[in-house]
Image (spheres, helix red, strand yellow):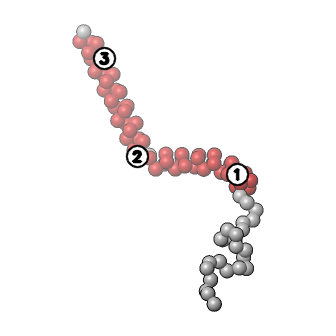
Amino acid sequence: MQKIVNIVAVASGVVSIAVVSSGLYVYLQRDQLINNVKSQVMEAVSGSLPGLVDTKMPSATGGVVPGVSAGKAAGLGIPR
């Protein structure tokens, strides 16, 4: 019975050391891991982005105020 308890204790210690060491590794390497993920996401998105921008963006836009052409003044105006 004592041998089984010792085996369980050693296995528990090994698991605890593995969890703590992996957590420490992630904590110390977090900047590198974040930059790696960002670069992978940017590569995936940039491949499809130019096609979306070319097809979804209008070729020309109108005036700033809807219904008013570029030469006319907008607003209420000054009464005469």
Local packing at callout 3 (Cα closer than 10 Å; few below 14, some 14-19, many 20+) is few
Q: CA distance from mark 3 to mark 2?
A: 32 Å
Three-letter code, disc 2: Leu
Element carrying mark 1? helix
Give the mark toward the camera: 1 or 2. Answer: 1
Q: Residue furthest bottom?
A: 80
- For label 2, the residue is 28
Residue 1 sits in quarter = top left
Local packing at callout 1 (Cα closer than 10 Å; few below 14, some 14-19, many 20+) is few
Q: Specify which label sits upstream in the sequence, 1 or 3.
A: 3
Along the line of sight, the residue nearer the viewer: 6 or 74: 74
Along the line of sight, the residue nearer the viewer: 58 or 29: 58
Up the image or down, 64 lies above or below 43; here it is below
Residue 74 x/y as whole percent: 65, 77
Q: Residue furthest top?
A: 1
Residue 50 visible here: no
Q: Specify which label sits upstream in the sequence, 1 or 2.
A: 2
Residue sitting at x 74%, y 53%: 55
Apparent side of residue 59 relative to residue 65 in the rendered image (left or right): right
Q: Residue furthest right?
A: 59
Apparent side of residue 35 relative to residue 19 in the rendered image (left or right): right
Residue sitting at x 72%, y 51%: 51
Three-letter code, disc 1: Leu
Residue 34 x/y as whole percent: 49, 48
- For label 3, the residue is 7
Along the line of sight, the residue nearer the viewer: 13 or 43: 43
Element carrying mark 3? helix
Q: Which mark is residue 31?
A: none
Q: CA distance from mark 1 to mark 3?
A: 59 Å
Q: Residue furthest left?
A: 2
- For label 1, the residue is 52
Three-letter code, disc 3: Ile
